[in-house]
């Protein structure tokens, strides 16, 4: 399990490498802020963890000629390709066959080699691990690695620095790296609402079973939230302090994405709209006077589909 000390160490390590993203204040009487993390380098929060992982590996002398290897539905690959280019590191990114072409093209544009492998993230992950062993590349997990999750948690530090009165942070969950990092950062200071698509409820099922379990992966948000099972870091985080676990429908995600565009001109990917969907759909409602921050965590989507 990671702690706030890990998050603070990550903050110091990546300072100057990532953007401090804005916190959009509520309008009218609403007590809901939006953390605009979709404005991060590469359009995704994962850039924080990618820099933290690679910089830590450089400090320890772990990055040789083969550089870094990562498996990704798209966003982690983007983040690691971006960080690797900035740090002068070779990067190889394994993606599943259905990975969106818009993300694959951008990964290549950052200079990384892209290898398509398997029908879903879990198969790409296995191929990436094999590559790392064979080539001597340092492995970076897309979400279940302490340095990656701690890097993600730095956005929550920014939230509470900018608005200390916030009671609750709402995040989307796939493999759980963002959730684990945020939970570590705000432990004892704010609560976390963990929102997942009904079509891939990894954390929800793990909490019910008492251990991580495999789930079927499908739905509009599967390219970014389509892990087959929740990571060990996320599972440990919920054991330490259980979040409010919420599931949202496909229709709710689509509506939230449309509303983010219509109301704020935020071009969110489906996974990043999942947290907002919990509030809009009524799947979760804050208590009277509860001050809430919703993390909009990614913008890597086809803008022609925004409507």
Image: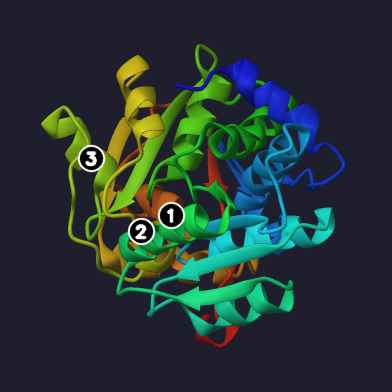
Which of marks 3 and 1 precedes in the sequence? 1
Dot 2 corresponds to which residue? 126
The local crowd at label 1, few if under 14, some if 14 to 19, many if 20 or more residues have their Cα within 10 Å, is some
When asked about the image quadrant of residue 300, the answer is: bottom right
**Circle 2 Cα neighbour tier, 10 Å, few/some/many (<14 / 14–19 / ≥20):** some
Q: Is residue 144 above or below residue 265?
A: above
Q: Quadrant of the N terminus?
A: top left
- Report the front residue among 88 and 65: 65
Left or right of residue 131: residue 96: left
Query: Which residue lies under the disc numbered 1?
Result: 129
In the rendered view, tell whether residue 167 sits above or below residue 282: above
For label 3, the residue is: 204
Residue most extreme to the top: 188
**Callout 3: SS:** helix
The residue drawn where x is 55% and y is 66% is 93
Residue 249 locus on image (x, y percent)? 25, 60
Residue 115, percent from left and from top:
50, 75
Q: Position of residue 247 (x, y in %)?
A: 26, 48
């Amino acid at each position: 399990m990671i702690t706030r000390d890990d998050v603070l160490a990550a903050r110091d390590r990546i300072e100057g490498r990532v953007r401090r993203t804005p916190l959009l204040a509520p309008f009218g009487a609403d007590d809901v802020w939006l953390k605009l993390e979709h404005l991060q380098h590469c359009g995704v929060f994962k850039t924080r963890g990618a820099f933290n992982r690679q910089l830590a590996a450089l400090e320890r002398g772990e990055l040789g000629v083969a550089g870094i290897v990562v498996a990704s539905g798209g966003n982690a690959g983007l983040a690691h390709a971006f960080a690797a280019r900035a740090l002068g590191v070779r990067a190889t990114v394994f993606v599943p066959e259905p990975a969106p072409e818009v993300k694959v093209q951008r990964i290549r544009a950052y200079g990384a080699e892209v290898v398509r492998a398997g029908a879903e993230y879990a198969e790409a992950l296995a191929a990436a691990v094999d590559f790392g062993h064979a080539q001597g590349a340092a492995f970076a997990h897309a979400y279940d690695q302490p340095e990656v999750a701690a890097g993600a948690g730095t956005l929550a530090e920014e939230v509470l620095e900018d608005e200390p009165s916030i009671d609750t942070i709402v995040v989307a969950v796939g493999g759980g790296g963002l959730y684990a990092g945020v939970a570590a950062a705000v432990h004892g200071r704010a609560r976390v609402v963990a929102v997942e698509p009904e079509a891939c409820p990894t954390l929800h099922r793990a909490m019910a079973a008492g251990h991580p379990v495999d789930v079927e992966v499908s739905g509009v948000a599967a390219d970014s939230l389509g892990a087959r099972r929740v990571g060990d870091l996320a599972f440990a985080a919920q054991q330490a302090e259980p979040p409010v676990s919420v599931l949202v429908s496909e229709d709710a995600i689509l509506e939230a994405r449309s509303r983010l565009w219509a109301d704020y001109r935020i071009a969110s990917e489906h996974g990043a709209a999942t947290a907002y969907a919990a509030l809009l759909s009524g799947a979760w409602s804050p208590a009277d006077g509860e001050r809430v921050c919703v993390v909009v965590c990614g913008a890597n989507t086809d803008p022609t589909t925004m409507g």
